[in-house]
Image (spheres, grey):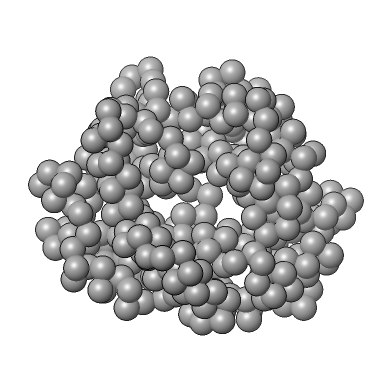
Amino acid sequence: MRLHDYAPRPAHLKWLLDSDPAVRWQVMRDLIGEAPDAIAAERSRVATEGWGAHLLALQSPAGNWGGPKEDRGLLTTLYTLVVLKDLGLDAASKQARKMIDRVDKRLVFRPLNNRPFLHGETEPCINGRILAIGSYFKGPNDALANQLLAEQLEDGGWNCEARPFLSPKRPPSRRSSFHTTICVLEGLWEYERAGRKSVALTKARKRAETYLLERHMFRSLRTGEVIDERWLRFSFPTFWHYDVLRGLDYLRNAGINPGVRVGEAIETVMARGHQNGRWPLNLLHRDRIPLEMEAEVGKASRSNILCALRILRSYRNSVLHL
């Protein structure tokens, strides 16, 4: 099938709209082009209906989602907050404000002398996510953003293994990780959207985007081989894991026109779509949040379909303007 064959079909749009408010409002914005007032009205339902409301209700009075025995890194809470952001929970809603105030005032990293959660911890993959969460729901954290900018590696990306204390028996890595890089890029993008655009930030983001694009979004720069076959299979939620769909959606969201450099990655997305024009959930990661949204591997995934269709639409429009 050719690129234009993947335009959203009426039957597919109807099926996507007959779902959770978090999917509906994004379909209205990204695939249909509804009026802003209608989109905002649908988006407001994320806080009171479906996945978003369910996750909000599961937050403990202490501010977390993992219960009293949650790991010291608060990963269940981190991943839940990322999902709430990705669902499009309106940060201005009273439900979101109540939720993030609990996080801000009550959650700390105990192993780090009770550092407040939204101030970040030590690993750039986690700090990129926290920067995104804080910038979206609460406000930009300049110290955390500057810390991430200072940790950028020479090849343009980031890697948690660049921190020597994490692997004391081996030297710190000088090579970036796709997983860490996409987490930091998403964080820097949300930080910039929160009003913190600067020359240094733009330069850092451009270097990291070039890191992905030079590798065609999934290939080794040295050998040209596929770095990890799992990156060609799509999941939801992604947690900390990179895949081609996530990388391409970042470029779309950030307004990057990558041109022919992502042609092979776009072909990968098209190849993952079934003949009926629907994309399945290819895999589930072992990480968890306290809510199963799409849990059947091999079944059509509304989240993946929405993401794939808007990526292909954006790429189709960019090709027309080359």
Identity of the residue drawn at 20% across and 54% down: 7
Identity of the residue drawn at 84% across and 65% down: 105
| Residue 144 or residue 198, whichever sits in front | 198
**Residue 313 visible here:** yes
| Residue 22 or residue 302, whichever sits in front | 22
Quadrant into which the C terminus falls: top left
The percent position of residue 157, horizontal first and vertical second, equals: 55, 28
Q: How many marks?
A: 0
The percent position of residue 288, horizontal first and vertical second, equals: 53, 65
**Residue 99 visible here:** no
| Name of the residue lying farthest toward the right | 113
Q: Is residue 5 above or below residue 262?
A: below
Q: Is residue 154 above or below residue 186?
A: above
| Residue 80 or residue 306, whichever sits in front | 306
The percent position of residue 40, horizontal first and vertical second, equals: 51, 69
| Residue 161 or residue 198, whichever sits in front | 198
The percent position of residue 3, horizontal first and vertical second, equals: 17, 44
Specify whether 272 is left or right of 287: left
Specify whether 105 is left or right of 270: right
Specify whether 165 is left or right of 296: right
Specify whether 211 is left or right of 275: right
Identity of the residue drawn at 53% across and 27% down: 206
Which quarter of the picture shows residue 38?
A: bottom left
Identity of the residue drawn at 67% across and 25% down: 200
